[in-house]
Image (cartoon, rainbow, N blue to C red):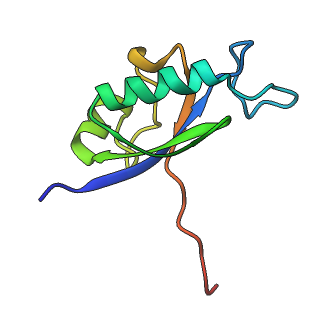
């Protein structure tokens, strides 16, 4: 059985910046649709989506080949997703009991 990894793809705003930048507009429905299709084509499952990003899940080795190893390197947006994505992050698990 392969390990799976969950991540969040941060989408680009209509101006081309990250949707998380101050004052940025949310991603267009076309950007969301294109990003979803690209991720599925790259072998990932889309878990959730909204105008700020797409939550994805997939094989950890495939993820590492495309985005880098989250344990050792900064994550990068591969060329295949550069037109729709401004970044990728691994969500942190909530700390329920500090």
In the picture provided, is 15 more to the left or to the right than 92? right
Numbered-mark total: 0
- Does 71 sit above or below residue 17? below
- Quadrant placement of the C terminus: bottom right
Residue 49 location, x and y as percent?
56, 41
Residue 77 location, x and y as percent?
47, 25
Res 51 → quadrant: top right
Residue 75 location, x and y as percent?
46, 35
Of 57 and 74, nearer the camera is 57
In the picture provided, is 42 more to the left or to the right than 52? left
User: Which residue is painted at 53% across and 67% down in the image?
Assistant: 93
User: Which residue is painted at 88% across and 28% down in the image?
Assistant: 23
- Does 19 sit above or below residue 69? above
- Does 12 sit above or below residue 68? above
* Extreme-bottom residue of the structure: 97
Of 97 and 51, nearer the camera is 51
User: Which residue is painted at 59% across and 71% down in the image?
Assistant: 94
């Amino acid at each position: 059985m392969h390990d799976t990894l969950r991540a969040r793809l941060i989408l680009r705003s209509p101006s081309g910046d990250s949707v998380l930048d101050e004052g940025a507009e949310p991603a267009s429905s076309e950007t969301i649709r294109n990003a979803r299709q690209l991720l599925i084509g790259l072998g990932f499952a889309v878990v959730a989506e909204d105008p700020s990003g797409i939550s994805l899940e997939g094989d950890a080795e495939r993820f590492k080949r495309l985005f880098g190893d989250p344990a050792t390197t900064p994550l990068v947006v591969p060329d295949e997703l550069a037109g729709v994505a401004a970044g990728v992050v691994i969500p942190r698990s909530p700390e329920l009991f500090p």
